Amino acid sequence: MIPIPGARARAPFPYVGLATAIVLLHAILVAVVPPNPYRAVFALAALFSVGYCTLALIVGLTIRLSAAEILAFSTGLTIFITSLSALGVSILGIPITVFAVVIVGLPIALGATLVLRPRGNPLAAFTNFTRAFLDLSDYSAAEKGAVAVLFVGIVGALVIFVSLAAVHYPGELSPGLAIAAPDGTANITTSFNQSQPQDIVASVFGGSTAGAFMVRIRLVPSNATGNETFHKVLQTSPLRMDAFAEYSVSIVLGPRETWSQQFSISIEQAGDFELRFALLDATSTVVAENLLAVVVT
């Protein structure tokens, strides 16, 4: 136990109420004020207040600490509580935001305020606080209705926040590939007449970063085993394709850029096929694919 020299203050944690007010005000600012440098500075004070209130809960009125010791322990506990709250919400799968620290820090600050009140049993203080907080006896019917709506809103917001654990957020936007009819609809003709060209539009949507890609078109018989090799088709219009024919075109996309091209495709033999449109990145890895089952007569 840390010794208690007489020079140390009799009230080791005189500013728990102020620290609680700072954390509460920070929660309000986070909710209503857009991010700015002033809010960031106030957030640092709120974080330190969480560590200060945590230290007050741990030490209580039994151990006297100097100002330097309070500063050191409060700073350490601030780092610990912040890291622990961020780790906790990340394990749950909830996106880490400033609200994570608010949700953890505000109960700690309120608890310290109740436990370290000047007189009375901590449990009785908490009970009295809760009873007074929920006492609506002097409210009118309209005011009670408004309070009920507010409570429902708070509970609903908490449920939505926790339910975010089931939502997966991509780290970055991935590129995509789509095929459509010339009129822009999904009504692509699946019945081909042999050697009669049909038009299909392929569109590529860029991801979060720029890069080089390749759009590849393959004609694969429906009974293919997957071990066959493909032969190249010359760049002509229409693209005259037979079984295991392959055509590719290289493109470069900027972030979120869109590329589109209409292909006139003529299938030179009858049968059941799959027209496979694929988007490959610079390492020849397929990042998006779309296929169309066609019947050629």
Image: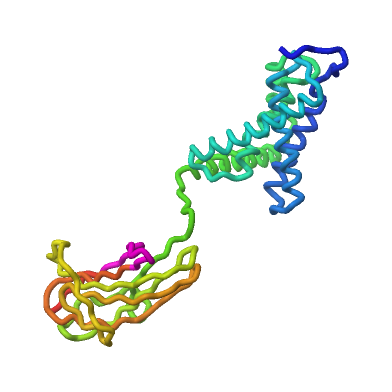
Asked whether 165 or 282 is in front, the reply is: 282
For the N terminus, the quadrant is top right
Q: Is 6 on the left or on the right of 296, as rendered? A: right
Would you identify the image quadrant in which residue 55 lies?
top right
Would you identify the image quadrant in which residue 230 lies?
bottom left
Q: Is 217 on the left or on the right of 109, as rendered? A: left
Q: Residue at x 28, y 84 (%)?
A: 235
Q: Is 62 on the left or on the right of 173, as rendered? A: right
Question: In the orientation shown, which residue stands out farthest toward the front?
Answer: 283
Residue 79: image location, x then y, percent: 65, 34
Q: Residue at x 73, y 35 (%)?
A: 48
Would you identify the image quadrant in which residue 128 lies?
top right
Indicate whether 179 appears above or below 149: below
Q: Which residues are magenta?
A: 279-291
Residue 99: image location, x then y, percent: 62, 42
Q: Residue 77 in magenta? A: no
Give the colouring mode of the picture: rainbow
Q: Residue at x 77, y 32 (%)?
A: 19
Q: Residue 290 in magenta? A: yes
Residue 240: image location, x then y, percent: 21, 83
* Main secondary structure of the magenta stretch: strand
Indicate whether 224 appears above or below 260: above
Say if residue 135 shows up in the picture: no
| Numbered disc total | 0
Say if residue 96 shows up in the picture: yes
For the C terminus, the quadrant is bottom left
Q: Residue at x 77, y 50 (%)?
A: 38
Indicate whether 66 appears above or below 262: above
Residue 141: image location, x then y, percent: 69, 38
Q: Is 217 on the left or on the right of 60, as rendered? A: left
